[in-house]
Image (cartoon, rainbow, N blue to C red):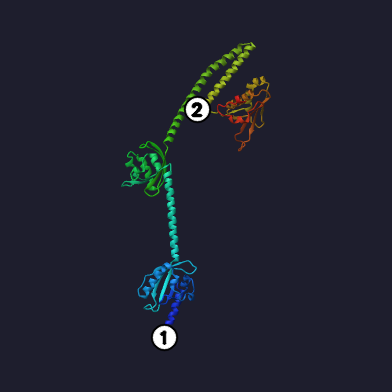
Amino acid sequence: MSDDKKNRIMTDCESVVCRQLADAAPIGIVRLNPDFLIRWVNPAAARWMGGEDADLADQPLSRFVMAEHRPALNRLALDLKAGRSRAPRPMALKPAGRPRRHVRFTARPVGEGAADGFIVMFEDLSEGRRIRESFDRKIRDHRRSLRDVESRFHHLFNEMITGVALHEIICDADGKPVDYRFLDVNPAFERLTGYVADQVIGKTVLELMPETEPDWIERYGPVALTRKPTAFEGFSRSMGKHFAVTAFSPAAGQFVVTFTDITERKRMEAELREAKEQAEAASRTKSRFLANMSHELRTPLNAVLGITDMATDISTEAPVRENLGLIRKSALSLIALVDDILDFSKIEAGRLRLRCVDFDPRSCLTEIRRMFDPEIRRKKLGFEITVAHDVPPVARGDPDRLGQVIKNLLANAIKFTDRGRIDLSVTRDPVQGDADGPIVLRFSVRDTGIGIPPHLRNRLFKSFERLETDV
């Protein structure tokens, strides 16, 4: 076999191998003739150029390049034909009926010169471009959102009625906070402190207010250094105002202070404390007066009772004894009134004590009935005391206070009942828990009097309320 035939076979083999490699390549490869007409394309280039190898053959490459890039392609062709190399450059392909595809062109002659045509290789930049465009779009959106947030923040910062100031802490060589500098303030700061922003920003608090108390710096220092927020109320002697303050750190070495003027609130609180103290002092004075007056009244009343009892013992005339009885009854009523006044003063002073002794509920009610029998007979009312069978013979409590309550209830019932009857009953309330534990007795007074209208019942048990004038 001749050497020429061997060379042709080797060349054909190399061509086959090269074509197989080109078909498998992920980049576009185009073989051009000397006139820049397409001879063949690999599958990647065919996809990007929108056709098949056979359809693209003999077509000018410029047909598949965007119009704005064709001058650059023509310059590339002239440089290649003249033997001048060109660096890779980006271009855009425009396949028929498809969106443009951005690629990077690299071209070189097939042989030593331009006679054998050219090889053009291009790698797809569309995905990377899409990624960059998406990234740029996100950056633009982020910047737009950031501008919106900053705009809203500045609007809020400027319109707040709460004073706001941004500071940086200043420390000495040992790291101890000794001062702080104003970085920014809002209009509310100017209204609340009287300092304008141009006077404040850039200056330290000791430059602006040399008489500032060290307590303020000591409070703000840990906030800026440890970034732990704090809230407190303080008085600024340099401004003569009380402030409610909240401080937090937006960045290391800085702190933001928000504050409101609470001077008026503090003044009102002081006035309320003073008024409360005066009212308590007046109440104590009144209680002492009532206690002393009550004791002073009991002395002559006891004397009246004693003399009345002596006169009753020696008198035999019925009219005289009846009058003496009225005097004695009136004196007892006055003593009961004095006892009520004493109880009232004890309650106000917090010294009222309830006894806890054993007593017989039935005997207690019998004594109360004996006291009201004359008035009940005078008004010709029916009166009955009912004690449930499960009420024990001995109860534990304060019989004097119990009697006081029942007497008041019976007195009202008799006063507002002109005919009919009055019933006093005692029952045992069921109590949850141990059967051998404490028991609860319920004392009830019922009458056939005028009653209390529903719209007035909410006034019951209120201090200094009387329903008598309304019924």
Q: Quadrant of the C terminus?
A: top right
Q: Residue at x 43, y 57 (%)?
A: 140
Q: Residue 45: percent from the left, percent from the top?
A: 46, 72
Residue 76, quarter of picture: bottom left
Q: Residue 234: percent from the left, percent from the top?
A: 40, 38
Q: Residue 466: percent from the left, percent from the top?
A: 58, 26
Task: Answer above or below: position of 30 versus 316.
Answer: below
Of callouts 2 and 1, which one flags the residue occurring earlier in the amino acid sequence? 1
The answer to whether residue 393 is left or right of residue 299 is right
Task: Answer above or below: position of 243 versus 388.
Answer: below
Decide which of 158, 192 is in the foreground and name it: 158
Mark on residue 6? Answer: 1
Residue 360, quarter of picture: top right
Q: Quadrant of the N terminus?
A: bottom left
Q: Amino acid at mark 1?
A: Lys
User: Callout 1: helix, strand or loop?
Assistant: helix
* Total numbered circles: 2
Q: Residue 184: percent from the left, percent from the top?
A: 37, 46
The 10 Å Cα crowd at callout 2, few under 14, some 14 to 19, many 20 or more, is few
Decide which of 237, 281 is in the foreground and name it: 237
Which residue matches tag 2?
Answer: 349
The 10 Å Cα crowd at callout 1, few under 14, some 14 to 19, many 20 or more, is few
Disc 2 to disc 1, C-alpha distance: 131 Å
